[in-house]
Amino acid sequence: MRTVGSYSGRVRLGALVAALFSVSCYDFRGEGPEDPSPVVPPAVVSVTIEYRQPLGCVNSAGSCDDPVVFFGSWLRLGQAVTLSPRSGGLIWVGTAHNVPVNFPPREYAHAVRVYDPHIRDHPTGGVTAERLWVGRQLLTVYDSEGTPAESALVYVDENGFGHNPF
């Protein structure tokens, strides 16, 4: 009786296949670098903040002596920079630290604003971006102007100078 494919033939075929695979090692990795490129955190700088408070206090609660507080989109929830009054009390100044550099324009501009207790009864609820200087730049480009979400947009360079969006 004749069998299809003898045992010794299958052994020889298996040995041939094993020899072929042992000659070359198949690499299952795709083409590209061995390791991912390192994550480079953005450069950060300190930026001067200056805000000019309007004359008079429009605050029915009578808390006009409260400080002006600065907010930036790079700050974490609950973080803020409390500004200090300078000569005469209508100019408020401070320094924001660890501001990510994003100029020349990369991605989005930073959104910034202040809370001013002098204008608490204004339709913005005391939030404004008007009369605000960031990194020696008077900000002139606004988002949601005249609302409680009002913000000014600014780019910050590696020297800590602000730039209005183009």
Image (cartoon, grey):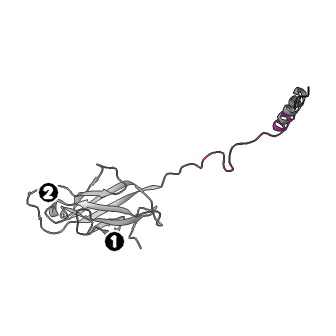
Q: How far is the residue under mark 2 from the one under mark 1?
A: 29 Å
Q: Report which residue position mark 1 lands on.
A: 141
- Check the image and report above or below for 22 versus 81: above
- The C terminus appears in which quarter of the rendering? bottom left
| Image x and y of residue 19, in percent | 85, 35
Residue lying farthest front?
Answer: 1
Q: Report which residue position mark 2 lands on.
A: 65
> Residue 165 colored magenta?
no
Q: Residue at x 90, y 27 (%)?
A: 8
| Image x and y of residue 149, in percent | 26, 62
The rendered magenta stretch, by its main secondary structure, is classed as loop
Say which element carries label 2.
loop
Of badges 2 and 1, the one in the foreground is 1
Q: How many marks?
A: 2
> Residue 30 colored magenta?
yes
Query: Badge 1: how crowded within 10 Å, few (<14), some, or many (20+)?
Result: some
Q: Which residues are magenta?
A: 18-39
Residue 163 picture quarter: bottom left
